[in-house]
Amino acid sequence: MAFRHNTEIGQNFLTDKSVAQWMIGRARLSPADRVLEIGPGTGILTKYILDAGCARVDAVEIDVRLKEYMEPLAASDDRLRLHWDDAVKFDYSRLDETPTRVMANLPYHITTPLLWHLLESFAGGDMRYMMLMIQDEAASRIVSGAGNRESSPMSVTIAAAWQAAVLRKVPRTAFYPSPKVDSAIAEITLRCDSYAPLPRDTTWRRLLSGSFAMRRKTLVNNWAGAFGVKKDECAGILAAHSLDTRSRPEGLTLPDWLSLREDPTLTSYIERRR
């Protein structure tokens, strides 16, 4: 019986081997690398990862129906460990060894929660590189950094510690069944260890989520609603950081955000609202 794809969980398997080969060539895996693969599907990318000669591969897959494809591969290569679980909820501390690299083909609807989970789980550890195949628009937002209309809590946090870029587009015809949108490959490389723990910083996370609560509104309005900061105090906080009351979250630079995280008045309000 033919495998019936579960479109409810965004199951679009990569079938274009040239894309998988390109990803492996770009990732430059070494014999010391421990790779975490999210959503291996039928194992097309997994095989290339193993062939690249890395030390270990941990593959997390939610659909147990794929055991018929993945278990023979694991039986033939003891470097491959299979974990049948939801990658968004998986406890990555259960892995015997911390991965150094993540490679994944992600459904759009789990991209943001999964990326937060990975950043939280591996913050400050050995994981220093991610290659993600995701929806084209989502990739653009993730790598957008700070200070533009696509900025978000995720993109600002990544910009603090990581170098992120969209490497190439991948047409929908590279998958089966073909999704309704094209994909892109995003590369995220750790560049600043001191800011790598930020995803675990609850004050940082709340500062960003509250500031972007209504992204087209000013910080004054967002802070009043999210943290209860009085508008005159908002003005004083902003002035101390060379910002004015018209400032909106998408207009702030990364140094602005890092400076606001250290503001004692603002952080006091944020921590009171926990």
Image (tube, helix red, strand yellow):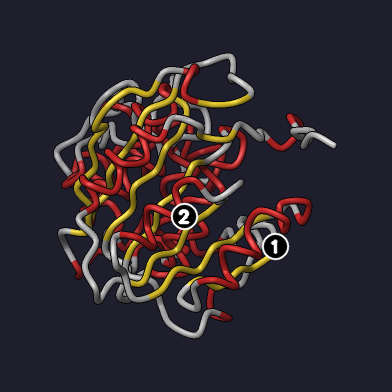
Q: Is residue 161 visible?
A: yes
Q: CA distance from mark 2 to mark 1?
A: 17 Å
89 on left or right of 46: right
In the structure shown, which secondary structural element does the residue marked by tag 1 occupy? loop
Circle 2 residue: 46
Tell me which residue sits at (33%, 53%) in the image.
130
Given the image, on which type of amino acid does mark 1 rest?
A: Asp
Relative image position of residue 270 (x, y in whole percent): 48, 57
Q: Are marks 2 and 1 in contact (CB under 8 Å)?
A: no
Locate residue 30, reporting x and y percent: 21, 67
Q: Secondary structure at mark 2?
A: helix
| Residue in view at x 20 percent, y 34 percent | 243
User: Where, quadrant-wise, is the N terminus in this rendering?
Assistant: top right
The mark lying in front, picked from 2 and 1, is 2
Reply above or below: 254 against 140: below
Q: Position of residue 235 (x, y in %)?
A: 30, 37
Question: Can residue 249 be seen here?
Answer: no
Q: Position of residue 69 (x, y in %)?
A: 66, 53
Q: Amino acid at mark 2?
A: Thr
Instruction: Single out the residue that lies furthest toward the right.
Output: 1
Place residue 252 in its image quadrant.
Answer: top left
- Which residue is denoted by mark 1 in the rendering? 85
Q: Residue at x 42, y 37 (%)?
A: 133
Q: Nearer the viewer, residue 262 or 235?
A: 262
Quadrant of image for the C terminus: bottom right
Instruction: Give the residue at the far top of this rendering.
Output: 180
Residue 251 falls left or right of residue 113: left
Within 10 Å of disc 2 (Cα), the crowding (few <14, some 14-19, many 20+) is many
First of labels 2, 1 by sequence position: 2
